[in-house]
Amino acid sequence: INNGNVSNTGEMGDIGAVYAGGCFGNLRTDNITVTNCDNYGVVSFTGNSHGACLLGGVVSDVRGVATFTNCDNFAKGNITDSPTSKTKVSKLGGICADFQHIDSTASKRSTFTDCTNYAKIQADAGAASSSSDLNSDNTLTRVGGGFGNLQATTSYDIELNNVDNHGSLVLNFATCNS
């Protein structure tokens, strides 16, 4: 159980990326089992990652086969991403920012059971310096109450049971300064 705050402010360098989760940042392996894991803290990033910014209430990034049971996000504040125009990808999720089911044997299923988000999920795109920054093909924002991005090869790969969102979703887009 996390009752603290997870946050970062500032520059991360030209190849930097931010992976922040209330309980886990990055899980990349097969046969991950997480049970009764709750976040009561705040997950936030303000600055410029120059790459990816993944913020999740419970976990930011999962690659592999996983089972999550009874994992909730009760964050006391917002999960926010306030990047400048150089951040290429922002994914925010109340439970998980980016989940990619990867199974080399194609025989296992990932499951999420009884997982709920109660936090406000907010993405604020920073002010752009020109109109070309606003229309950049390199910028992608995905925001979801449960997942920012959920990816699998087939519909069999992932099973969701009682995965709920009770928080609000807010997207604030940048304005152009020139």
Image: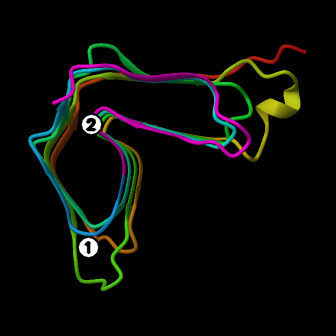
Please determine whether, in this image, residue 161 is positioned above or below residue 116: below
Residue 136 horizontal/vertical position (percent):
78, 40
- Out of 93 and 25, give the one closest to the viewer: 25
> Residue at (23%, 24%) from the top-left corner?
118
Whether residue 157 appears in magenta in the rendering, the answer is no
Q: Which stretch did the figure color magenta? A: 1-26
Q: Identify the element where label 2 is drawn.
A: loop
Q: Is residue 142 left or right of residue 25?
A: right
Q: Is residue 39 above or below residue 33?
A: above
10 is within the stretch colored magenta: yes
Say if 108 sits above or below 143 in the image.
below
Is residue 122 visible to us here?
Answer: no
Residue at image coords 84%, 13% = 177
Mark nearest the camera among 2 and 1 is 2
Residue drawn 26% across the image and 36% down it? 23
Left or right: 67 as drawn, with respect to 148: left
Q: Which residue is mark 1?
A: 156
Measured from the top left, where is residue 58 in percent x and y?
Answer: 27, 37
Residue type, label 1:
Tyr
The percent coordinates of residue 29 (x first, y second) are 32, 65
The disc at residue 23 is 2
